[in-house]
């Protein structure tokens, strides 16, 4: 017993536990702790509801109740949908969230501990510290319970093992995606282009496949697409293969799939670990390549004096961060696809206002997509943030430069998105184009006014690449959700009026008025935000520079 | 005239004093070495004097401007250059961009800031690295760049927190000469913290020693040093005996690695 307690691994576990615990109980950790506890509390009822749904499908598949489709196809569909649904939701959620518990392997390589054990420890700790992991466990548990209710017997043991293997496989696959993403996106924008191209191509394939049949797609058509797509995350696809055979009662046929799943999981985990280790030993650096001047200089000349220098710095930073480039490629591409494939499904009799809603939606969505930059505006400053307090700057100018640079980025994405929507779906009425622009520009100051306060009150160091993609602390993300909902609701009021009167031209003037009010709010709150920035300098510097004074 | 003057300057963290009742007097044109053991309050004092921290109580004035007056804050910052602990560099800028933008933030026209940036990069032997991102610089290169940034607007008072830490001996020698020339030419007052007492002793004209947040010695180098060396005075002043300390397990044969 004492051997285990004295082992280096036990010391490492204690070290990480203490670091996490102190971070959560520290000055800046309380908000995260509250968000985490709320996350667990929220996941229980939501997970229970999801588990009932999954359980019902598993019950139906296991009990072999007569379905709509012949030859056990109905059960296959339910099992595939269960594994595909959990796999894609797990993947999407994990890739979108910040991994606070993720292990920085570099810090621990100096100790005489096996790197593989450290990495595995990091993965397990990451799962335990993630409220969503509870949600996935509840879903899988629901599937197992439903299967037990449908057909109780010894086959539940391999099914339980399959569920555990599926969880491990998805976690290993995610680790592999993250390590590959980190490796690819750490380096240059060319790689970001590749990433975006892959994403857009995958979306295009889905849209094209779904769009072959002009009629309403049938359930089995969608499942066929899922069955093809699941091989993108190959370990999970093997789980579905084994699951289908287990639910049919063919244990022997399921065994090779389970063995393949175990091998695939181990392989995915091993490759992810090797990539993580190589990155850690590489120092995680970008190699010291020379970089070009970029757009910053052009913007810097537009505003004379220190303000221009601030704006140039902000634009240069955005131009060198891979996320703006990825957003500039992905959002317009998706908007174009929506205009091409989804918009024609809106019936003419729904009215012009309803038919123009996609182009309006894009105008607002761009702000949501770029929220990391306006809700955590100081997250990328590192030591540079000290310069704001050391140099003779008016802090209002710092905020204005940040807001203007993000506004320019968002406007660029909006313009590209609208252009592609017009190319793909044809010209909308002129009032719809004007409305989209008015909505985009008019809502921006509302977001930035709130974003400035959130950025100052809850700053957090954000990654300089897309790895571990999140750039927002939990509370800021929550504030962003509330802000976006509130602003969307406010700007939806004119839509209700326009729908009632079927007069789309009302939208642009109404949104210009709301935008003017937002602009006034933003302008009037700037001095207060600057004062807040000054009075919170110690907390902000401690948060973004790691300098605890 | 005093370049820095504080009276009863105090800063508490969680009720505990990091700097307590500090009264400093740094004459204009002085090269002031601010010494103290680890955790004595040197960096906190520098942050208080540069506005990165707010004092809990007491007064501080820099170049004749009261730091508690927010209207004077911008004026003071224009006259001061700072190399803070942890530096103030943007990792996603190149060295050249950092210096030029730094200069512009201090009010220099773009062309003049670019000219001075080039000159400073040459002086710091960073010309070859000018086009690389700062995130890829070594620690010593970052230090030199931060020092260049602090000089670009021609400040009257320079705050340097451990400026020689992590810089090679050749570069230290060059920077030391540059700083001495600036002070001797009457262009600048320098307030410096450092643990390298030999370097401090060769550089400074005045010394202050802080321990547990309180100033325990202050004066010209000669007054503080007396007949001994600065290291002897430093150790004597902070009350630490230089005892020979041995580690029990390293005395035993074959103990290494056990």
Image (cartoon, coloured by chain):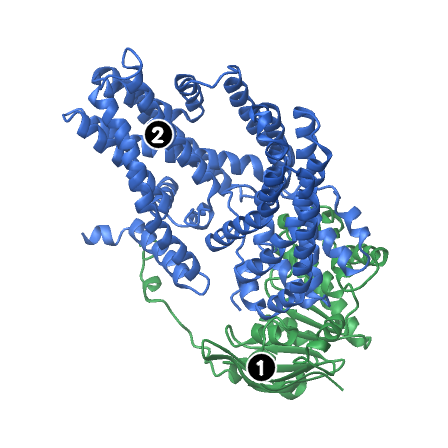
Chain colours: A blue, B green
The answer to whether any part of residue A106 appears in the image is yes
| Viewer-closest of A227 and A28 | A227
Coordinates of residue A176 in the picture (x, y in percent): 44, 33
Disc 2 and disc 1 on one polypeptide chain: no
- The residue at the point 56 percent across, 63 percent down is A540
Q: Residue A414 lies in what quarter of the image?
A: top right
- The residue at the point 78 percent across, 65 percent down is B153
Chain under callout 2? A
Q: Residue A144 lies in what quarter of the image?
A: top left
Left or right of residue A188: residue A102: left
Total numbered badges shown on the rendered structure: 2
| Viewer-closest of A249 and A81 | A81
| Viewer-closest of A467 and A150 | A150
A124 in relation to B120, above or below? above
For the residues labelled 2 and 1, the Cα–Cα distance comes to 60 Å
- Residue receiving disc 2: A266
- The residue at the point 83 percent across, 56 percent down is B110
Left or right of residue A31: residue A17: left
- Residue receiving disc 1: B209
- The residue at the point 21 percent across, 33 percent down is A145
Chain under callout 1? B
């Amino acid at each position: 017993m004492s051997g285990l307690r004295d082992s280096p691994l036990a010391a490492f576990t204690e070290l990480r536990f203490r670091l996490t615990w102190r971070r959560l109980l520290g000055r800046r950790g309380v908000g995260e702790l509250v968000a985490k506890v709320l996350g667990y509390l929220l996941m229980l009822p939501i997970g229970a509801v999801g588990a009932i749904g999954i359980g019902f499908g598993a019950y139906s598949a296991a009990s072999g109740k007569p379905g709509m489709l012949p030859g056990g196809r109905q059960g296959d569909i339910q099992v595939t949908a269960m594994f595909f649904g959990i796999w894609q939701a797990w993947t999407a959620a994990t890739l979108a969230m910040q991994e606070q518990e993720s292990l920085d392997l570099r810090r621990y390589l100096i100790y005489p501990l096996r790197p593989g054990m450290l990495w595995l420890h990091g993965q397990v700790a990451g799962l335990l510290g993630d409220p969503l992991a509870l949600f996935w466990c509840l879903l899988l548990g629901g599937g197992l319970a439903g299967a037990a209710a449908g057909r109780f017997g010894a086959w539940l043991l391999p099914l339980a093992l399959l569920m555990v293997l599926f969880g491990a496989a998805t976690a290993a696959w995610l680790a592999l995606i993250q390590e590959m993403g980190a490796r690819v996106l750490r380096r240059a924008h060319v790689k970001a282009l590749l990433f975006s191209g892959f994403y857009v191509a995958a979306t295009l394939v889905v849209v094209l496949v779904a769009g072959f049949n002009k009629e309403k797609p049938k359930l089995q058509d969608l499942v066929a697409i899922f069955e093809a797509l699941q091989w993108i995350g190959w370990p999970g696809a093997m789980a579905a293969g084994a699951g289908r055979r287990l639910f049919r009662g063919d244990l022997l046929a399921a065994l090779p799939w389970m063995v393949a799943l175990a091998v695939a999981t181990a392989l995915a985990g091993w490759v992810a670990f090797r990539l993580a280790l190589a990155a850690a030993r590489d120092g995680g650096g970008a190699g010291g390549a020379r970089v070009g001047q970029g757009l910053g200089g052009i913007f810097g000349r537009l505003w004379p004096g220190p303000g221009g220098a601030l704006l140039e710095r902000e634009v240069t930073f955005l131009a060198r961060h891979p996320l703006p480039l990825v957003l500039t490629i992905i959002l317009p591409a998706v908007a174009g696809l929506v205009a091409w494939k989804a918009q024609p499904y809106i019936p003419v009799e729904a009215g012009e206002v309803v038919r123009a809603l996609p182009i309006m939606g894009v105008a607002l969505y761009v702000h949501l997509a770029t929220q990391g930059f306006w809700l955590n505006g100081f997250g990328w400053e590192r030591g540079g943030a000290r310069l704001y307090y050391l140099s003779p700057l008016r802090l209002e100018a710092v905020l204005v430069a940040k807001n203007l640079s993000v506004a320019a980025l968002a406007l660029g994405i909006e313009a590209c998105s609208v252009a592609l929507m017009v190319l793909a779906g044809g010209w909308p009425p002129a009032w719809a184009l004007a409305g989209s622009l008015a909505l985009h520009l008019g809502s921006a100051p509302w977001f930035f006014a709130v974003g400035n306060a959130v950025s100052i009150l809850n700053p957090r160091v954000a990654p300089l690449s897309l790895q571990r993609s999140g750039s927002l602390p939990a509370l800021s993300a929550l504030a962003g959700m509330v802000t976006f909902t509130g602003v969307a609701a406010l700007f939806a009021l004119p839509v209700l009026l326009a729908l009632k009167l079927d007069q789309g031209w009302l939208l642009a003037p109404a949104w210009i008025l709301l935008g003017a009010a937002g602009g006034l709010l933003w302008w009037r709150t700037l001095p207060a935000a600057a004062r807040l920035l000054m009075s919170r300098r110690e907390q902000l510097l401690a948060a973004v520079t790691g300098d605890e004074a | 005239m005093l370049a820095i003057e504080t009276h009863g300057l105090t800063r508490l963290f969680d009720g505990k004093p990091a700097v307590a009742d500090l009264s400093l007097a740094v004459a204009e044109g002085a090269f002031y070495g601010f010494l103290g053991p680890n955790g004595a309050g040197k960096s906190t004092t520098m942050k208080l004097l540069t506005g990165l921290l707010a004092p809990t109580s007491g007064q501080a004035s820099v170049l004749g401007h009261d730091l508690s007056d927010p209207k004077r804050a911008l004026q003071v910052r224009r006259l001061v250059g700072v190399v803070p602990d942890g530096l103030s560099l943007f990792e996603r800028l190149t060295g050249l961009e950092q210096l030029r933008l730094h200069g512009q933030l201090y009010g220099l026209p773009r062309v003049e800031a670019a000219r001075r940036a080039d000159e400073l990069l040459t002086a710091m032997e960073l010309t070859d690295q000018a086009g690389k991102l700062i995130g890829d610089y070594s620690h010593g290169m970052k230090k030199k760049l931060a020092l260049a940034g602090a000089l670009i607007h021609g400040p009257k008072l320079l705050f340097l927190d451990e400026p020689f830490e992590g810089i090679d001996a050749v570069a230290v020698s060059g920077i030391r000469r540059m700083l001495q020339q600036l002070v001797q030419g009457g262009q600048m007052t320098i307030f410096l913290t450092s643990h390298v007492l030999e370097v401090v002793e060769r550089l400074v004209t005045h010394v202050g020693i802080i321990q547990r947040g309180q100033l325990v010695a202050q004066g010209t180098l000669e007054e503080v040093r007396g007949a001994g060396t600065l290291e002897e005075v430093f150790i004597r002043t902070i009350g630490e005996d230089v005892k020979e300390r041995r580690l029990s397990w390293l005395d035993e044969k074959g103990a290494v690695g056990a």
